[in-house]
Image (cartoon, rainbow, N blue to C red):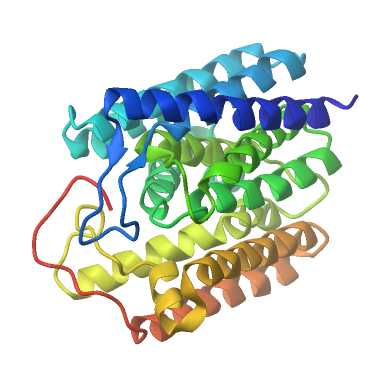
């Protein structure tokens, strides 16, 4: 069996089966998410679903990947373990929320850098020491930004896991077409783990992934974006592809950042029902409809990412400019959509 398919089925089976005992463990130790003003659920829901996905991905990689990039696999799993553990501790309430953003995520990015995984944007354009330093800085910004964006995306049943699964499909597809075995296996493992978890997490959710699971998925999405290479395509197409694949979470983070900043709030420390899914639900789609709509938009972004590899630099530039226009238009439109106003205070999660 192909390594990617093997990774997918191992992770799928593990996630489906392990979520049940993990849910029981969460209930036993009192790891539950209580209802509140900024929550959409009305009953206490067990957390720790991220533990099942973490175990599923690790098992899939250990059994399915036999390539030469062992050092990079160790670095990826070390960084993923760090953010997952810190996220779980934050779920438990034993860490200040700023530890995630300003300590754990940058350290996880540094682990990737030491493992040889980094952005390749400025080094190609500028070359030399300056390009390498700028790419290292970009790597940290990218990892922190994408990991944080998935952390705040986990606010509606099935949303974070579904968006990660959708993105993984296109990361795996492009990687497979370009002969990248590590990226293919890792993306397939995430796809299996997230899909299996959706069995228990789609509305009405029986378990939440918690911040540990959301950060874990976000870190792996950021890693896949750094590792993805589009052979025989323009440099611009190569770095636009991950942005398009992750366009839904990037859009949501952009909307929240602009909207909350305009209202005088700190974007990543002010909880509220003002995300893309909340606003779409309030426009008449409902929670399930909003989540499914974002799945469709994620598939559209991924499809464009596949096609962009066949475009010239000029064509890729037009796609990039078009994406920026769409994001700005979407933010402007959704800014006028109904949402629940926040009170002026800070909290540990969004």
Q: Can you give x and y, in whole percent of width and height, for residue 152 in the image? A: 36, 52
Task: Please report the residue visible at 48 percent of the width from the left and 41 percent of the height from the top.
Answer: 218
Measuring 40% from the left and 47% from the top, which residue is drawn there? 145
Question: In the drawing, does residue 268 fall left or right of residue 154?
Answer: left
Q: Is residue 264 left or right of residue 29?
A: left
In which image quadrant can residue 8 be found? top right
In this rendering, the count of numbered labels is 0
Q: Is residue 240 visible?
A: yes
Q: Position of residue 114 (x, y in %)?
A: 48, 19
Image quadrant where one finds the N terminus = top right
**Looking at the image, which is closer to me, 138 or 133?**
138
State the residue in front, 296 or 322.
Answer: 296
Location of residue 142 by image quarter? top left
The answer to whether one can see residue 107 in this image is no
Q: Is residue 159 above or below residue 328?
A: above
Tell me the residue at 54%/47% (across/down): 161
Spot occupied by residue 241 in the image (x, y as percentages of width and height): 66, 54
Could you tell me which residue is drawn at 61 percent across and 30 percent down? Answer: 15
**Residue 124, percent from left and from top:** 61, 43
Q: Is residue 268 left or right of residue 212?
A: left
Q: Residue furthest right?
A: 1
């Amino acid at each position: 069996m192909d390594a990617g398919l093997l990774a997918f089925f191992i992770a799928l089976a593990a996630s489906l089966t392990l979520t049940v005992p993990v849910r029981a463990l969460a209930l036993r130790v009192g790891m539950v998410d209580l209802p509140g003003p900024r929550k959409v659920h009305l009953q206490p829901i067990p957390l720790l679903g991220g533990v099942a996905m973490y175990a599923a991905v690790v098992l899939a990689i250990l059994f399915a990947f036999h390539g030469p990039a062992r050092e990079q696999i160790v670095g990826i799993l070390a960084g993923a373990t760090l953010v997952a553990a810190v996220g779980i501790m934050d779920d438990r309430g034993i860490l200040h929320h700023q530890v995630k953003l300003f300590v754990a995520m940058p350290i996880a990015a540094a682990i990737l850098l030491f493992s040889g995984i980094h952005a390749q944007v400025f080094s190609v354009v500028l070359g030399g020491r300056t390009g390498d330093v700028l790419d290292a800085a970009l790597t940290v910004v990218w990892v922190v930004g994408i990991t944080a964006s998935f952390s705040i995306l986990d606010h509606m049943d099935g949303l974070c896991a579904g968006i990660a699964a959708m993105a993984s499909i296109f990361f795996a597809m492009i990687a497979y077409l370009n002969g990248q075995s590590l990226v293919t296996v890792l993306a397939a493992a995430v796809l299996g783990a997230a899909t299996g978890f959706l069995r228990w997490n789609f509305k009405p959710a029986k378990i939440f992934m918690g911040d540990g699971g959301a950060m874990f998925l976000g870190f792996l999405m950021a890693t896949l974006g750094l590792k993805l290479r589009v052979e025989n395509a323009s440099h611009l197409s190569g770095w636009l592809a991950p942005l398009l694949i992750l366009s839904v979470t990037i859009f949501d983070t952009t909307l929240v950042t602009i909207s909350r900043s305009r209202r005088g709030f700190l974007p990543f420390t002010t909880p509220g029902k003002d995300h893309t899914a909340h606003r779409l639900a309030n426009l008449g789609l409902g929670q399930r409809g909003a989540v499914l709509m974002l799945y469709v938009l994620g598939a559209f972004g991924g499809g464009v990412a596949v096609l962009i590899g066949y475009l010239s630099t000029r064509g890729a530039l037009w796609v990039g400019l078009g994406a920026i226009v769409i994001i700005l238009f979407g933010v402007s439109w959704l800014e006028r959509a109904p949402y629940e106003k926040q009170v002026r205070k800070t909290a540990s999660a969004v």
